[in-house]
Amino acid sequence: MSNQPVYTIRIAAQLVGVHQQTLRTYEREGLLTPARSAGRQRLYSEQDIERLRLIRRLIDELGVNLAGADIILRLRHRITELEQENQQLKHEIQRQRDQQLPAVRRPQFDRQERRR
């Protein structure tokens, strides 16, 4: 999914199935921040479109209000950050273990002992 801003507000609104004013409201409420062109025109990326679709699902299907959608989006973002941090810590712990603990080696048996 691309983060390259390519869609104007008109196209973004059509893709999500809302009025352009709805997108302006979402921006004003802090639910998303589209990029701006040199002429200050709002431009939306694929990631923005997916975020908008999620916002619509929260509102339309789950009955969440804008404040609730904002909280959910922030919590999802924080969870993603924590999951990434957790993975980094796991890798660091494993690296530390590998450096401090000698490699566990399986005893070598000759072929005759394996056949028994």
Image: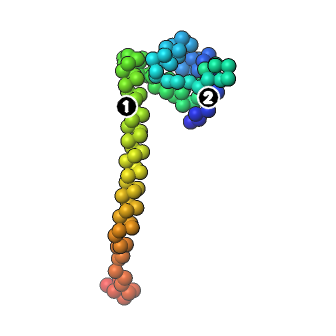
| Three-letter code for the amino acid on which mark 1 is drawn | Leu
Vertical side of 55 occupied by 97: above or below = below
| Three-letter code for the amino acid on which mark 2 is drawn | Pro
Q: Position of residue 59 (x, y in %)?
A: 41, 18
* Mark 2–mark 1 distance (CA, rounded to whole Å): 24 Å
9 relative position to 112: left or right: right
Look at mark 1 in the image and give the residue it sits on: 75
Report the front residue among 115 and 97. Answer: 97
Q: Could you tell me which quadrant the C terminus lies in?
A: bottom left
Look at mark 2 in the image and give the residue it sits on: 5
In terms of secondary structure, where does tag 2 sit?
Answer: loop
Residue extending furthest right? 39
Question: Which is nearer the N-term, disc 2 or disc 1?
Answer: 2
Task: Please tell me which residue is depicted at 54% across the width and 11% down the height of the picture.
Answer: 21
In terms of secondary structure, where does tag 1 sit?
Answer: helix
Within 10 Å of disc 2 (Cα), the crowding (few <14, some 14-19, many 20+) is: some
Task: Please tell me which residue is depicted at 54% across the width and 20% down the height of the picture.
Answer: 16
Within 10 Å of disc 1 (Cα), the crowding (few <14, some 14-19, many 20+) is: few
Task: Please tell me which residue is depicted at 64% across the width and 19% down the height of the picture.
Answer: 40
Can you tell which quarter of the image residue 47 is in? top right
